[in-house]
Image: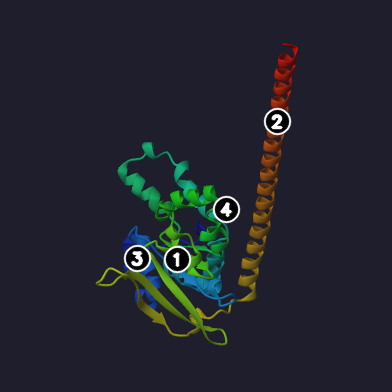
Amino acid sequence: MINPNLQIIPKKNYKKEINLQNLTIFGRKAVHAYYKRGFTGALIGGEFAMGKTTTSVHIAREIIQALTGCTDEEAYKEAIECIKFTADEVLELTNRLSKIDWDGLTPKEVLDTKFKIREPIIIWDDAGVHASKYKHFLAMDDASALQTDFDTIRDVTSCMIITVPENEELLKFLRSYRAFYHVEINKDRDYFRTLEFWKYGKDRSGRKKKYLKWRYAPNPQFSVYLKNEYYGEYDRRRTKAKIKNQEKVIKRKQMKQKEVEYYDMKKEYYRMKMEAEMKKLEKIKNSS
């Protein structure tokens, strides 16, 4: 959740207090989505070290600063906190809904509660590690849980950015989610990048087609430069998440090994039991 010390501008005043014209197109869409109970998102794809994460942080900083009127420093710190590194962290957000006694609320209270628990923006960094279509058959339970819970993602956030080396590597339900823009990030010069926002649709013959919605020319706002104090905090959180995920993978392998050993023992038990039964039958046959 956004730091409670940062007061979000009330809904009734946001069009007056937020200078929407100073925001990027995507920034405006994200602000409107927050106040109007809507949802928007972006899948940012690009080569390694192209600046997908830092670009996402810059976008999050713009949205948070617009909603709260805070300083650059405060907005960047909040933007770093918005980053999720694993599918488990994303699923934890949707679990908020199960902790509320919805039956005890009036219809107005239901809407107010949902508005309060929504995050203005979430960044899922390098989602291909956990939501790759190639891993679907390796961890079908995880993929199924993610797809089921993702249907309620708009109840806990109004904007989501997912970074991935290649959008086509994601699970189909993610890459085909209609609310997402497909963003291509390309190197221009030095730290500067060009962003192209695309949407998928169909042409007159019904074939799938990609349409360019808008392009951001290189500017400091979308450079890959991020101050060491912000990038260092991001790297610390990412490292901790990697270690935690490695421990989970090791534990899963150990559990799998135990299952294999259990079934091997069970198989050997039935083999020995069958041999004993066969010997018993042979003995009865010989005695007769």
Give the quadrant of residue 39.
Answer: bottom left
Q: Nearer the viewer, residue 189 or 120?
A: 189
Task: Name the front one of labels 3 and 2.
Answer: 2
Label placed on residue 102: none
Kind of residue sitting beneath label 1: Thr
In the rendered view, does 6 fall on the left or right side of 29? right
| Callouts 2 and 4 close, C-beta under 8 Å | no
Describe the element under mark 2 as helix, strand or loop: helix
Residue that badge 4 annotates: 138
| Callouts 3 and 2 close, C-beta under 8 Å | no
Residue that badge 1 annotates: 68
| Callouts 3 and 1 close, C-beta under 8 Å | no
Q: CA distance from mark 4 to mark 1?
A: 42 Å
In the rendered view, does 140 fall on the left or right side of 213? right
Q: CA distance from mark 3 to mark 4?
A: 39 Å
Task: Name the front one of labels 3 and 1.
Answer: 3
Residue that badge 3 annotates: 32
Looking at this rendering, what residue extends furthest in the left direction?
A: 204
Kind of residue sitting beneath label 3: His
Q: CA distance from mark 2 to mark 4?
A: 30 Å
Circle count: 4
Describe the element under mark 3 as helix, strand or loop: helix
Q: Nearer the viewer, residue 286 or 86?
A: 286
Q: Position of residue 266 (x, y in %)?
A: 68, 32
Please report whichever mark, 3 or 4, sits nearer to the chain's N-terminal start: 3
